[in-house]
Image (tube, helix red, strand yellow):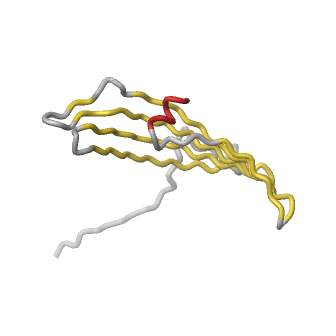
Amino acid sequence: MLLPLLAQINMPRPDFNPYSLKSSLPNLNMSHSMGFQAGTSSSGSGYYLSRYTNHLSYKLSPKMDLDVDLNFVNFGSMNTGSSFSLNDDNDTKLLPEFSLRYQPKENMSFELRMGQGFMNQTTFNRW
């Protein structure tokens, strides 16, 4: 009778991520998000919008936090009538946002915020 012998050893895995900032900036947190939306009307005109956001949060002190969002947005319009075609208005923008929060006391806080909306195309044209 022959029984197979199985063995497993858990070796530590090195972190080869070149973007890992854990050791140099312990108060920094980073996350990412992506989104896509598209729409069309019964008249045959449509739009598309894709977004990648890099969220950075840094604790400057126990009472002060800095948040930065870097939004990479791509948008344009399309025709969906008798045949599908993209128009020549494809554009990409970088829309930064940040906030700085300071809370000197439990019942008192200050916030400085700069943001740029990206939900409609008129916002892009003003940037």
User: Residue at the spot x=37%, y=45% of the render?
Assistant: 36
Task: Identify the residue at the far left of this view.
Answer: 82
Give x and y (percent) for residue 47: 33, 38
Note whether residue 62 is visible: no
Give the answer, above or below, for where 71 lies relative to 32.
above
Quadrant containing the N terminus in the rendered view: bottom left
Give x and y (percent) for residue 2: 19, 72
> On the picture, is 115 further left or further right than 85?
right
Task: Identify the residue at the far top of this view.
Answer: 88
> On the picture, is 82 further left or further right than 66?
left
Give the answer, above or below, for where 34 lies relative to 10.
above
> On the picture, is 24 further left or further right than 46?
right
Note whether residue 29 is visible: yes
Give x and y (percent) for residue 78: 28, 33
User: Residue at the spot x=32%, y=23% of the render?
Assistant: 88
The quarter of the displayed image where residue 62 is located: bottom right
Task: Identify the residue at the far bottom of this view.
Answer: 1
> On the picture, is 41 further left or further right than 114?
left
User: Residue at the spot x=59%, y=37% of the render?
Assistant: 96
Quadrant containing the C terminus in the rendered view: top right
User: Residue at the spot x=48%, y=35% of the render?
Assistant: 122
Give x and y (percent) for residue 68: 64, 43
Judging depth in this view, the residue of 103 and 59 nearest the camera is 103
